[in-house]
Image (cartoon, rainbow, N blue to C red):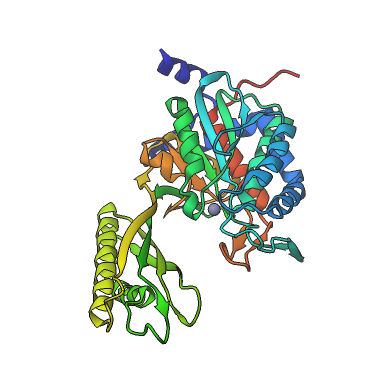
């Protein structure tokens, strides 16, 4: 019954399968979308409000939002979603959720952009302008996605579009680093039974669509020892020495080019002063692969290298009387892999949107909020929200809004393609 209803009431804008999404079928679909007055009004609103989007982007970027400290930026996004006529709430995890009820409240489509940045409190996030360019840490990742989220919500509101499926506009927490996708995990948990598609807006550009979730693990090695004085205790086992010995072994680990597999020694901490033998040393490592098997192999290799580094240090220590080194390897985070089916309605909707705006997308594999739904078999993609950007995760990050409207329209049309829209109102 439900399947029949879906077929009966969502013919309009329902994406076609890619196998037939070329040529006449695709242009017929494009024609349908172009013929809808409300959709045209939403597209026109986006065209004339790109500067508004840039203003919101700069304003939101200037509110610091390291992972686990997103609430102030979340409140600003909440106000913008309220202004877009949505029922907005903040869930227990800190996600901001703006609901646009559809004809069916049993079927849900999520448009999400992460709130958090990798920049710690105290980072100067003031936006500087260089001609059209905006420069600030986090301006593109994910100032662009957040600006896109609120602009699309606003465009739909201004055009009074009534979607078939309920649309949730979500600004989620904890996408970066040790946030470990906790925001999107909570969203998928809460709405899983009705969740038909998740569209993630992450960063700038319109050249790609991420349909494959890159699996990754974040690990932390901790080595501890008794510690002591650099002169009088010389020869005692030193946790930093052990860590360095282990790290040198690990970076010589061979990884295959295919399936593509990478590792990064991202952070080292330890010690208290130059003239103390440290009592603790930490190493954080990120490993990624197209294959879960390679991830497990690398995690095991890291464990063996830490054990060997500690053993080498203990064997070469002159004085073992004051204690020995201990070590452990802990999992800080794990991002599951997954892949969108090539014949999914969501990918067809994206392709149809591309055809309308005259864009082409290359399929990519990446690690984004889309990992979580994809790993559970829920249709999901991650796309940029238009314009161009660079220097993500660096202090030199920049964004150029040229072409932003194309990205916003592509995202809007993809969203409406999977959500469906009601019949035109007669005016
Ligand atoms: Zn991002």
Residue 307 falls in which quadrant of the image? bottom left
User: Which residue occupies the extreme top position in the image?
Assistant: 1
Q: Position of residue 315 (x, y in %)?
A: 22, 79
* Residue 397 as seen in the image, left or right of residue 320: right
Residue 262 position in % (x across, y down): 36, 64
Horizontal and vertical percent position of residue 263 = 36, 65
The reply to whether residue 414 is visible in this rendering is: no
Question: Going by the picture, which residue comes out furthest to the bottom?
Answer: 231
Q: In the image, what residue occupies the spot 62% across and 67% down?
A: 395
Please name whichever residue, 406 or 400, is drawn nearer the observer in this view of the structure: 400
Left/right of residue 384 with respect to residue 228 in the rendered view: right
Q: Name the side, left or right, on which 211 lies relative to 162.
A: left
- In the image, residue 350 lies at what x, y percent? 50, 41
Asked whether the viewer can see residue 117, the reply is: yes
Q: Quadrant of the N terminus?
A: top left
**269 in relation to 340, above or below:** below
Where 331 falls versus 30 (above or below)? below
Question: Which residue appears at 52% of the width and 18% of the height?
Answer: 9
Seen from the viewer's position, the closer of residues 348 and 35 is 348
The quarter of the image holding the C terminus is top right
Left or right of 263? Residue 164 is right
The residue depicted at 59 percent of the width and 64 percent of the height is: 390
Seen in the picture, residue 74 relative to 178 is either above or below; the reply is above
Name the residue: 28% across, 77% down: 313
């Amino acid at each position: 019954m439900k399947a029949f209803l879906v077929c009966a009431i969502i013919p309009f804008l329902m994406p076609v399968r890619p196998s037939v999404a070329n040529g006449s079928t695709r242009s017929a679909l494009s024609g349908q979308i172009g013929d809808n007055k409300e959709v045209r009004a939403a597209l026109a609103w986006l065209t004339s409000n790109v500067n508004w989007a840039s203003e919101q982007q700069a304003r939101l970027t200037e509110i610091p939002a390291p992972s686990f400290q997103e609430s102030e930026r979340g409140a600003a996004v909440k106000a913008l979603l309220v202004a877009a006529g949505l029922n907005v709430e903040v869930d227990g995890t800190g996600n901001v959720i703006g609901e646009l009820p559809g004809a069916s409240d049993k079927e849900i489509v999520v448009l999400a952009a992460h709130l958090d940045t990798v920049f710690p409190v105290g980072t100067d996030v003031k936006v500087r302008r260089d001609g059209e360019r905006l420069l600030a840490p986090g301006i593109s990742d994910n100032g662009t996605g957040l600006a896109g989220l609120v602009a699309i919500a606003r465009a739909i509101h201004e055009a009074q579009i009534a979607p078939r499926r309920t649309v949730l506009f979500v600004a989620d927490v904890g996408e970066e680093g040790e946030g470990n996708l906790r925001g999107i995990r909570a969203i998928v948990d809460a709405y899983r039974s009705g969740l038909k598609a998740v569209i993630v807006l992450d960063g700038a550009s319109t050249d790609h669509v991420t349909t494959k979730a890159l699996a990754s693990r974040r690990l932390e090695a901790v080595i501890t020892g008794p510690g002591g004085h650099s002169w009088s205790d010389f020869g005692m086992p030193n946790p930093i020495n052990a860590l360095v010995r282990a790290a040198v072994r690990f970076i010589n680990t061979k990884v295959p080019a295919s399936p593509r597999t990478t590792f990064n020694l991202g952070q080292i901490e330890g010690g208290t002063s130059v003239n103390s033998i440290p009592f603790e040393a930490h190493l954080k490592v990120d490993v990624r692969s197209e294959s879960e098997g390679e991830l497990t192999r690398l995690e095991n290799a890291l464990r063996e290298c830490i054990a060997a580094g500690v053993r080498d240090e203990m064997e070469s220590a002159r004085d073992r009387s004051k204690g020995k080194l201990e070590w452990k390897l802990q999992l800080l985070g794990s991002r599951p892999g997954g892949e969108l089916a090539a014949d999914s309605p969501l990918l067809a909707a994206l392709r149809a949107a591309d055809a309308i705006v005259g864009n082409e997308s290359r399929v990519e594999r990446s690690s984004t909020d889309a990992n979580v739904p994809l790993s559970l078999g829920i249709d999901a993609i991650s796309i940029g929200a238009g314009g161009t950007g660079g220097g993500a995760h660096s202090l030199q990050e920049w964004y150029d809004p040229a072409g932003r409207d194309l990205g916003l329209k592509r995202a809007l049309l993809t969203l409406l393609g999977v959500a469906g829209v009601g019949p035109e109102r007669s005016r």
